[in-house]
Image (spheres, grey):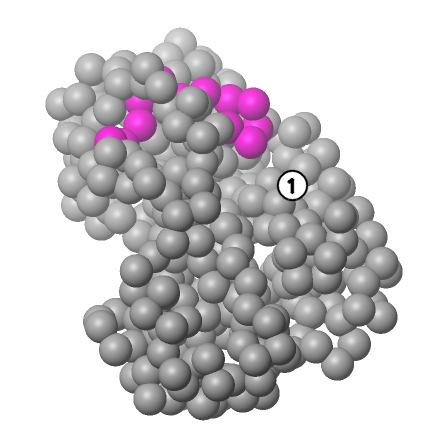
Amino acid sequence: MVVVPRTVPSASRGAVDRRTLLGGALLGGLGLLTGCSPVTGGGPAGTATRTLRTAYGEVAVPADPARVACVGYYTPFQMQALGKRPVAVADYTPSSAALTADQKTFLEGLPTVGTVVTPEPERIAAARPDVILGEADYADEDLWRVLSGIAPTALFAPLDNGDWLTVAEQVAVAVGAGDTLVDARARYAAGVDELRTRHAAALAGRRIAPITFGGTVGEFSVLHADNPYCSILTAFGVRLADFPSAPGDGSFTTIGIEALGRLGDATDILHPVRPDGGTFPAVDAVLAHPLFTRLPAARAGRVFPVVGYDVFDHATAGVAQREFAATVLGDR
């Protein structure tokens, strides 16, 4: 999956304080958060529908769809966490190395409808979906109109760079999994409280720097507080190392490798690895650079590989938090 998170353009997203976002998602009413209001009509012969707020306006979808086609990257896995299975998905062959074994098993046998970037309407129509779900990051309004001619199409967008909840929760409501969503919220909130209480002492004085590869050879990236992965760490008391961002950086800063010395404030440095334990050559080059090996965290042996950078629902957030606690804090 994506290791360097994208930056949400401010022109297309409303600015939302991360604390407000998390509080509203965990404690707010289901209908208030998603814009969901079950009604009758809008479908075949008076089928019950619900109205969803999407990136391209309000869309009426079946209240309990039986056939869901996914054109988004994360949408099938958000459904998987809810105990739901789509009837068609994008082709994940180009990114198969980034998938977990469980995700690969989940996708087995599902018809594919083109790639995430270039979905094929003919294949989507052949799947006979009741509803089409996906992410607006990969589909503009013109494509949304084409897909809407096949079936009601709900394409969702995060509210800001650190927002990992909104899309996941909208998908849950769209597939009629509201009860499962309530349970997922409660489990996540309880997990955050437990981690905060158990690890307060271990976190005191620690400053964490999650890094990854840059855009080109000779660069690296540092994730910031409004990055989804960082936001789920700070939720239970993790403090990030001081690495000021520049205007326009968004949720991460990409900079030349000669700036590695700026990580000197970090007591612990994290870097991504693949789900199968494989490494990224571009990250390996950063870790092997003399400027990196001289950093205090590297000299102290406090450099840790993690899988969980990709956070896109309550399940992946909880897994990433527990991985951090086990890997960095020794919580076995």
Foreground pick, 297 / 241: 297
Whether 306 is drawn above or below 215: the answer is above
Task: Identify which residue is drawn at 56% across, 63% down.
Answer: 304
Residue 270 x %, y %: 53, 66
Foreground pick, 249 / 147: 249
Instruction: Find residue 104 and report its image quarter.
Output: top left
Left or right of residue 268, residue 200 in this image: right
Foreground pick, 283 / 47: 283
Residue 43 visible in image: no
Residue 305 visible in image: yes
Residue receiving disc 1: 30
Q: Is 85 included in the stretch rendered in magenta?
A: yes
Foreground pick, 170 / 29: 170
Task: Identify which residue is drawn at 33% across, 89% down.
Answer: 258
Left or right of residue 268, residue 141 in this image: left
Q: Is 261 included in the stretch rendered in magenta?
A: no
Residue 257 x %, y %: 33, 82
Instruction: Using a 10 Å C-alpha cutoff, classify the residue at mark 1 as few (fewer than 14 neighbours), some (14 to 19) or many (20 or more).
Output: many
Whether 251 is drawn above or below 45: the answer is below
Left or right of residue 147, residue 134 in this image: right
Residue 88 x %, y %: 31, 22
Whether 79 is drawn above or below 228: the answer is above
Instruction: Find residue 195 and report its image quarter.
Output: bottom right
Magenta segment, which residues? 80-91
Task: Identify which residue is drawn at 36% across, 78% down.
Answer: 289
Instruction: Find residue 218 and report its image quarter.
Output: bottom left
Report the label total: 1
Residue type pointed to by label 1: Leu
Q: Is label 1 in a helix, a strand or a loop?
A: helix
Task: Identify which residue is drawn at 55% across, 37% down.
Answer: 36
Residue 60 x %, y %: 41, 31
Dominant SS of magenta comes to loop
